[in-house]
Amino acid sequence: MTIHKSVLAELVLEVPQIKPQIYFKSSLTALSHAMEDQVLASSDQPLVIATFQKERFYRQEAHRYRRIANLTSQVYVLAAPETEFKNSSEYHETVAFNPRDALSREWNLLVLGQDYSSCLICNECDNSGLVNETSQFSGMEQARRFEGIWTFDRQVCLQSAKLLLARILKYRPELKEKVQAAIEIYGINLDLRKAKKSPQSKSASNNTNFQKALVVDENTNFNHPFAERLVTYLQATQYKLLKTYRSMAAQEKKQRLINIISSAMRRSLDPDEIIKVAVQELGEALLASRCLIYQCRPLDGTATITHEYLGVSVKSLLNQVWPLKDNDLFQKVVQTQGRVYIEDTSLLPEYLVSETSGTAKSQRRNCLENLISQWEIKSWLMIPLLYQGRLLGMVELHNCGSCPYNWSEEQIDLVEAIATQLSMTLIQAETYTHLEELNQQLEALDRTRSNLIAITGHELRTPLSTIQVCLESLSQEPDMPEELRQVMLETALADADRMRHLVQDFLTLSHLESGRVEWNIEYLPLLECVDLALSSIRAHNLERELPNITTQVSAELPLVLADGEWLVEVLSKLLDNACKFTQAEGRVIIRATSNNENMLKVSISDTGRGIEPNRLEAVFDRFYQEEGALRRSVGGTGLGLAICRQIISRLGGQIWAESAGKDRGSQFHFTIPIVGNSQKQEERQKEVH
């Protein structure tokens, strides 16, 4: 048997003038104890009916009800059984009701004596939100809320007794005689089959006029003044406690999220990993439909969404290009360096639209409206990731329901606290990255120093030694044959020229890196520059057999925008490099093609020694030697490719190498601007100058 209607609901139907109010558990506990103490302190023998939601709640008060049972025989205790609670008459009447009964959500206590009466009839409210907010605080059990009445009015107490005794008889019909005795003693109007009226009832006259007496004046004061003040004090105290606990819960949630992000930061300084953790935790904590965290800068036109928290039945933005330049909400954040919160996007305020006019204003507003429509954004919160006034990224929360979502000030404060932590994390990760780059540069400088020592020892000492030997021989051997004298002179001159080239390369690279070079940018035919470079290579290798050099450069190619002298220098060094590492029976090919980006791509391929794939980037380092400075089979300073990179970079192009590996040849490519985009060319001319 299960009764689904609460006693409070039945009582309100019987006495509609009753106005239930909210009580906290702590208040009901104090009131219940006061009512029980009144029974224990008096000599009267009242009717006492108490309902407990569960057996364990009764066990906490069992000793009090056994003491009450020693004073009066009319004691009834109802509870939902959990272990040993059952129907019994051992100390007092116990009634075990079905756990699904409405009584399992009620707090009822009735004391009905001959000279006084009081009752608590309450039904528990839905406390699920409160429990979720403050479940970590054990004290919040006392903040559970109940709706009901507490009164000393005898007629209301009689009606409550009638309803409670009816419940008792439904569960324990064998108590009909004892219940009938209570009805007669205390003047309760309860219709029982085969019940006999006692003419000796002290309150028989009350039964006759019960319906009239039940009419309660709305202005009737149900409670004693002192008790009213006591409950008011308890209620106010409980509201303060509830507010404090909620504040503690919000603070704990904030600290928990910050700790999670800090923990992720300790595990790794990778921004992607940290943002991945933060976006998930923040989205869950704020109950957002969609949470986005992305890195950006004030002048960025777009951002690619790589991290997202997604609610149920919400479209994903992952890997989508998110507009920033034409997004007035983003621009408002950049302008104010503060939050932007639109509770209802259908009422988007006009002031968010930029101050531009005409087509630009319409375009930006359309962009915003398209985003709202396409991604079903009803409420929109944007909070910047700032570090010392510098924008590092953005946190966005979207609510995609049909109704606006009002994020509270505490929730927004939580997002701002997380944003502050994320900003620190991102700047630390950026600093760490810069530190890594600096360490790599320091390591490169250290390698440069070591290589410089080795090259100086090899490239300078060797020709100096040769020159010294030749000059000493000429000085000490005046009768040296003319032919040998000529050989000595030519050897000394050749090594002197070798030293000159070495010093020249040092000076050239130094000037390029320091920016002290004067550039003469002009329109040039690439084929002419290639021919000049080939002439230079052949002139410097008269005594050496060069590999077959093929030129596949069309005269119809557009003019390039460059400094002719430096472009010839690049071509000469790349051709010299290709010839140096290619046997005489090999081939060197020069090609040039135009791409779709106003650039000309030049490639110099050879069939020579090749480069290991893991060394393709290192070959452009200063003093890099494929074979090592002291055991290589060809001469050179290791500065040629470093010089080429500096020149091409200054001219606005790129240079790179490709190779399938050792003895499989290599290809060096670089790009150079061409005629076709005058604005870009003018900007490039300004940059190099």
Image (cartoon, grey):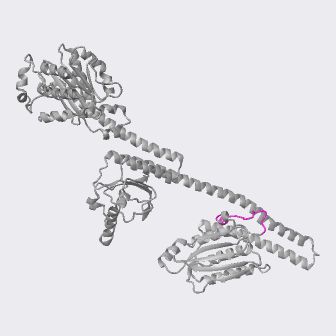
Left or right: where 233 falls relative to 665: left
Q: Quadrant of residue 546?
A: bottom right
Query: Residue 597: x and y, percent?
Result: 51, 76
Assign the magenta stretch its main secondary structure: loop
Left or right: where 468 falls relative to 334: right
Q: Answer whether residue 114 is visible to the viewer in this image.
A: yes
Left or right: where 31 falls relative to 310: left
What residue lies at 47% left-to-right and 52% top-to-bottom?
Answer: 276
- 684 or 124, which lies in front? 124
Query: Residue 428: x and y, percent?
Result: 51, 50
Query: Residue 362: x and y, percent?
Result: 30, 69
Q: Answer whether residue 508 is visible to the viewer in this image.
A: no
28, above or below 603, in the image: above
Q: Quadrant of the N terminus?
A: top left
- 158 or 439, which lies in front? 158
- Residue ranking furthest to the bottom: 556
- State how many labels appear: 0
- 544 or 497, which lies in front? 544
Left or right: where 683 falls relative to 82: right
Residue 247: say if magenta: no
205, above or below 493, in the image: above
Query: Residue 69: x and y, percent?
Result: 24, 16
Q: Quadrant of residue 630?
A: bottom right
210, above or below 640, in the image: above
Q: Quadrant of the C terminus?
A: bottom right
What residue lies at 14% left-to-right and 22% top-to-bottom?
Answer: 183
Q: Quadrant of residue 231?
A: top left
- Please give the range of residues in magenta: 617-633
- Residue ranking furthest to the right: 479
